[in-house]
Image (cartoon, rainbow, N blue to C red):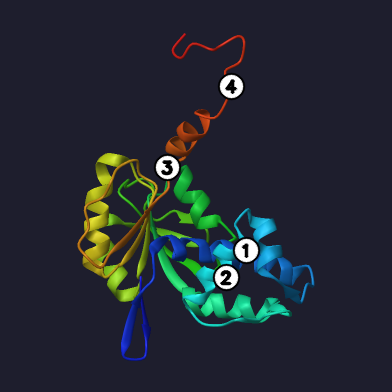
């Protein structure tokens, strides 16, 4: 990410940007618990991140606390919302009205975090016209046009791998510049389009490396 600071443009490492929502989530919880002041030490203990790393990450964007007094929880929370641009509501489109698409369209956790699903699309004629999360499922034939019409910048792909690249192309043509991809495939996108991947199988496979096998192992396929 490039952070503009007056006439000088400062490049912020992506790994820092990825940690900011983690800090924001912790601060949201603290605010709901009525906590007014925190410190990098307390945040670090909650998140398993060193206090030095937290201070370094935040320093990319300015000074938010005072030595000896810590951080004002609500102020720091609001500043992180501003930095992440979630101090507003971003309209999103979900492509794929299967089980995952239904879950995403009905998910209540988006609304208070700066996101709202405003359109759902599917290629199955049997699903088009049905309602999901208060929205009418629309045809893929109108996807690009509707994305542009609604000013949607964020798309969520919840389709099989073989259809994902075509969906991404249509989203980008309509004006989408950020894609959350649940399909188990790496997308090819032009410069300026951000893609984040969510693949539960990859996450599970990385976790099983750390597990000790049971004495009685289950043979896959048996």
**Farthest residue toward the bottom?**
6
**Farthest residue toward the right?**
34
Asked whether the beta carbons under mark 1 and mark 2 sit within 8 Å of each other, the answer is yes
The disc, 3 or 4, on the residue closer to the chain's N-terminal end is 3
Residue behind mark 2: 55
Q: Nearer the viewer, residue 184 or 91?
A: 184
Q: CA distance from mark 3 to mark 4?
A: 23 Å
Q: CA distance from mark 4 to mark 1?
A: 32 Å
Q: Position of residue 205 (x, y in %)?
A: 46, 31
Residue behind mark 1: 51
Q: Nearer the viewer, residue 200 or 142?
A: 200
Nearer mark to the viewer, of 3 and 1: 1
Residue 98 shown left or right of residue 34 in the figure: left
Residue behind mark 3: 199
Q: Residue 2's image quarter?
A: bottom left
Q: Is residue 92 visible?
A: yes
């Amino acid at each position: 990410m490039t952070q503009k600071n007056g006439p000088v443009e400062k490049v912020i490492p992506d790994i820092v940007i990825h940690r900011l929502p983690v800090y924001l989530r912790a601060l949201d919880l603290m605010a709901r618990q009525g906590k007014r002041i925190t410190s990098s030490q307390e945040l670090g203990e909650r998140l398993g991140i060193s206090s030095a790393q937290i201070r370094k990450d935040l320093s990319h964007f300015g000074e938010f606390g005072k030595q000896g007094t810590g951080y004002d929880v609500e102020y720091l929370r609001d500043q992180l919302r501003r930095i992440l641009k979630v101090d507003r509501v971003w309209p999103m489109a979900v492509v794929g009205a299967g089980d995952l698409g239904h879950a995403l369209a009905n998910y209540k956790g988006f609304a208070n975090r700066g996101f709202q699903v405003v359109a759902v699309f599917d290629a199955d004629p049997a699903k088009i016209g049905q309602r999901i999360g208060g929205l009418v499922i629309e045809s893929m034939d109108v996807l690009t046009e509707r994305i542009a019409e609604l000013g949607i910048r964020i798309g969520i792909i919840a389709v099989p791998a073989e259809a994902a690249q075509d969906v991404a192309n249509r989203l980008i043509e309509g004006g989408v510049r950020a894609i959350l991809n649940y399909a188990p495939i790496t997308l090819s996108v032009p410069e300026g389009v951000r893609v984040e991947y969510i693949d539960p199988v990859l996450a599970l496979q990385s976790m099983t490396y750390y597990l000790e096998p049971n004495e009685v192992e289950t043979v896959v396929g048996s």
